Image: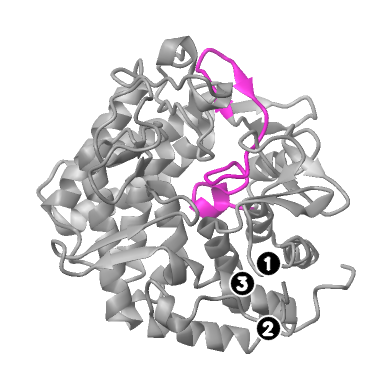
Amino acid sequence: MDTTKKSRPPVESRSFRSDAIEAVIERVSSGIEDPKIRLLFENCFPNTLDSTVFYDPDRGEGDSFIITGDIDAMWLRDSAAQVMPYIRFADQDAGLRLMLEGLVRRQAACIHLDAYANAFYRDPVLGEWKDDATEMRPGVHERKWELDSLVYFLSLSYQLWSKGGATACFDKSWLTAVRRVLEVCREQQGSGAPYRFSRMGITSSETTALKGIGQPSKPCGLIRSAFRPSDDSTIFPFLIPSNAFAVVALRQAAELCDTFFPESVEASECRQLADEVETAIYKFAVFDHPSGAPVLAYEVDGFGGCIFMDDANIPSLLSLPELGFIAVGDPLYQATRRLVLSEDNPFFFKGSAGEGIGGPHIGLDYVWPMGIIMRAMTSNDEAEILFCLKMLAETDAGTGFMHETFHKDDPSDFTRDWFCWTNSLFGELILRIEKDRPHLLQQKITGAEH
């Protein structure tokens, strides 16, 4: 593909248009010196709006269904992450704000349908995974219990209110969804009942142990998660990045409840749960690593078992400062960061094309660009940020977009050429650099050594 040309759909074929976002693209692009970085931003930043939004302003009070890209279903996590870079501009564009409020309404409706499901269809149909051994309902695409799915709903809600000026979507339906989030989290602090999940004839990461129950855990204040944000099953049930993200988002949800429902009990219950989880993280998830420093484990079971690793999908250990749980300069985070960006992490891969964190979802030797992006977003080292930008630009296989993964030795060997989560995350990275370190974008990056 000729990477000197834009790869956006024609204007008439785009699924949603925002004048505010178009103005941002023009403004930011004008300050990017490197043509490849500029092209990637112009393609990636608007990709969710260009290609994945199904917005119906006449459905209820406004409904937005946002697919991941090449999979015709909406994940709570992905759809929230895909729109995060746009939220800061919602107060400048009423149409954009209404569309984003429609997504909050749609996510609340999904939680009402099944708070244990991770992905949904636009209409009440049964689809690809209808034969999974769990309680499948029409409208549910996949029923993998992933704590981060509900946490992203809370985070999306808060960001849209605090940064985007939204208010209309915070109604009784929203509060009922928050109530259901609390109920499920409390259930999963215990034995994990009533959730069960099994999938037949698939690799072990696609199902759960012990006939759908999952591995045992000792109640300790942490919240179980049967699956990771990669959609892979957990090894130990307490997934620490998701629990850490929950601490932040529950406190944000409490602030929203105080604002819109001051007489409700949900605010105090959100804060109490957040306090319990935070205490448990520091009590049960900090371990001395053989390398010599205390670090956060990726998963634990409450009995003393833990696994030292990280997965590129967010929430990850690497992303914890970005999610608001811990400061970048905290020694515990820095020790954890050194671990997960080294060969002490079994899913850190380094090859002739690039290096970064992967995960079991695709397999060994495949680097996830979102991990490279998060490495740059959690760094204060400008040389490291430039290194990440160069690597991202030179591993797109000439497509002008980010991918799910690429092989560490061959960027033409990649997965998913239409994966909007990573495209949006790349857009967020460029916006962050343009705001905080604009001089980095005012130089040639690709084809140069850093």
In the rendered view of the protein, which quadrant contains the N terminus?
bottom right
Q: Earlier in the sequence, mark 2 or mark 1?
A: 2
Residue bearing the label numbered 1: 399
The residue at 13%/61% (across/down) is 60
Secondary structure of residue under mark 2: loop
Q: Position of residue 398 (x, y in %)?
A: 73, 67
Q: Position of residue 401 (x, y in %)?
A: 63, 66
CB atoms at circles 3 and 2 under 8 Å apart? yes
The residue at 38%/79% (across/down) is 17
CB atoms at circles 2 and 1 under 8 Å apart? no
Q: Is residue 165 visible?
A: no
The quadrant in which residue 204 appears is top right
Residue bearing the label numbered 2: 32
Residue 303 in the magenta stretch? The answer is yes
Q: CA distance from mark 3 to mark 2?
A: 9 Å
Q: CA distance from mark 2 to mark 1?
A: 19 Å
Q: Position of residue 438 (x, y in %)?
A: 66, 80
Few, some or many C-alpha atoms within 10 Å of disc 1 (few <14, some 14-19, many ≥20)?
some
Amino acid residing under circle 2: Ile
Provide the major secondary structure of the magenta segment.
loop
Q: CA distance from mark 1 to mark 3?
A: 18 Å
Few, some or many C-alpha atoms within 10 Å of disc 3 (few <14, some 14-19, many ≥20)?
many
Residue 240 in the magenta stretch? The answer is no
Question: Which numbered mark, 2 or 1, is in the foreground of this view?
Answer: 1
The quadrant in which residue 260 appears is bottom left
Amino acid residing under circle 1: Thr
> Is residue 354 shown above or below 102?
above
Nearer to the camera, 186 or 423: 423
Residue bearing the label numbered 3: 430
Residue range highlighted in magenta:
299-328
